[in-house]
Image (cartoon, coloured by chain):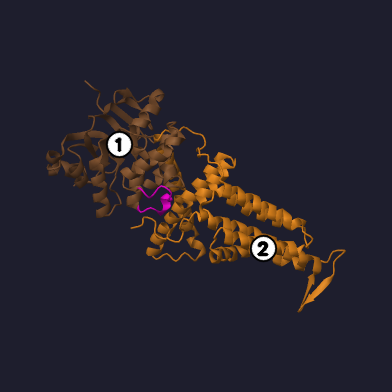
Amino acid sequence: MHFTPGHEHIHEPPETGGLDARAKIVAWLGLAMAGVLTPRGQWAVLGVYGACWLLLCLALAAPLLKVLRRLLAASPFFLLLAVLLPFRPLGPQDHAIAFGPLTLSAAGSEQALDMAAKASLSVACVAALAATESLAGITRGMQRMGAPALFVTLMNFTFRYLLVLREETLRMKRARDARAFGGRWLWHARVVGLMIGSLFLRSIERAERVQQAMASRGYSGGAFSVSSRSLSGAEWLLIASSLMLFVAVRLLPL
Amino acid sequence: MTAPAISVKNLSYRYPDGSQALDGVSLQVGRGERVALLGANGAGKSTLMLHLNGLYESRGEIEILGVPVLRRHLKLVRQRVGLVFQNPDDQLFCPTVFEDVAFGPRNLGLPESRMEEIVTHALARVGLPEAAQRSPLHLSIGEKKRAAMATVLAMDAEILCLDEPTAGLDPRGRRELIDLLKELSQTLLVVTHDLDLARALCPRCVIMARGKVVAEGETSGLLARHELLLEHGLA
């Protein structure tokens, strides 16, 4: 019996290849950075970075289909901005292109494509990192890399209790719906407001209890410690080879 | 004579809103004893439990293995008394079970080199040897309860206070938990209103109502007094 039904799909991703999270973080974020720093118009370079992404995915055995699905799910958020750019007024060194009944700005269109490509690459890198390493691994890796411990602790708590809170919300919603509350009209906003309020109070109470549980095990403030561990040869190899590859792509006469 | 595991004398506590949660409670638990603290909701059981390792402070005397619960002894007292909260989601707040079980020992300043051994041992003790790298989110409630037990066993606590350990468990989970508790050699104070649990686990019990201890004695005798249980919301 699961206390938290509906969690089945949030499986802990396996620690692919058993590599330390730090190596993966550097590789994926390095690729995202390399992509973002590519000057506009260098499509070949961006294309090769796309190939690098695929290569890394294969090397780290990332579940490609899952990563692409996540990329697709996130895409409306960053594509929405890009869609508007071609419709901006023409600038000085700009010309119009006809696209069916529409007139588009050439510079704006290029900018839109550039933005879309870089944003897709970055999100794809983050999605792939999330698919090849557990959140616990990522935050632990971040802390080992010197990220502020308070920030890392906050991230862990947020993730840990966001899901608990979601469960609580769902239970409340179910209880509300069980009493035949449609919830589609403006005058129902009061009930929603009450629900949010009670969720807020419950969260404060929970925070209090978690704090008590921490204090009762001797916690007296300060950041959580994390064990240190030195990187293995394979991990250094991943870091060095991926960073060198990203730099080399920029230096090639593409 | 060695000091008892828990000694509470004339403890009173008032909530900030003015309601009297504990009203002159006195209680003794011997070393290695298993005692059930029974009472209806709001009787003050959990409030008493929070006092035992200094989370709440108020008038009255509390001694743990002869050491008064004072601010300067907090570290010692918190190592000796392990509280297991009713909702394991409050107790397991780390991204992995390993981190959660290691949390207490790390706060005690135990060396990182021993952590693996300590955690493995505690998890094996509660029958979850494979759970170290799992997220608490993905444990069943029975597993969560046992992982929460491991977090205090890892601190080598001599006294365990369990708040409603069987709440929310299915019959099998309940039986497994009771079996586990029976095997422990630590002093146990079990806060509950589950009378069957008290019968199965604790030779002695204490009944609280409205912040006072209203009866205490041998479990079988006390729980046979139907009118007593009825009066205090336990039947």
- Most foreground residue, B99 or A241: A241
Instruction: Note whether B104 is above or below A168 in the view shown.
Output: above
Report the predominant secondary structure element of the magenta stretch.
Answer: loop
Looking at the image, which is closer to me, B3 or A210?
Answer: B3
In this view, the residue farthest toward the bottom is: A100
- Badge 1 local density, few (<14 within 10 Å), some, or many (20+)? many
Give the spatial CA distance, label 2 vs label 1.
Answer: 56 Å
Check the residue under mark 1 and report the chain it is in: B
Q: Position of residue B109 (x, y in %)?
A: 44, 31
Q: In this view of the protein, which residue sits in the foreground, A26 or A209?
A: A26
Look at 20% across and 34% down and name the residue there. B214
Quadrant in which the N terminus of chain A appears: bottom left
Q: Which residue: 25% across, 54% down?
A: B172
What residue did someone put label 2 on?
A50
**Amino acid type indicated by mark 2:** Gly
Kindly indicate whether the residues beneath marks 2 and 1 are on one polypeptide chain: no
Query: Mark 1 falls on what kind of element?
Result: strand
- Residue A127 in magenta stretch: no
| Residue B53 in sight in this render | no
Q: Is residue B133 magenta?
A: yes
Q: Is residue A130 left or right of residue A179?
A: right
| Residue of label 1 | B160
User: Does residue B34 sit above or below B147 in this rendering?
Assistant: above
Which portion, as a residue range, is magenta? B129-140
> Among the chains, which one is orange?
A
Q: Which amino acid does the dot numbered 1 rest on? A: Leu
Q: Residue furthest top?
A: B1
Which part of the image, by quadrant, shows the C terminus of chain A? bottom right
Q: Is residue B101 left or right of residue A104?
A: left
Q: Chain of mark 2?
A: A
The colour of chain B is brown
Q: As displayed, is residue B180 above or below residue A59?
A: above
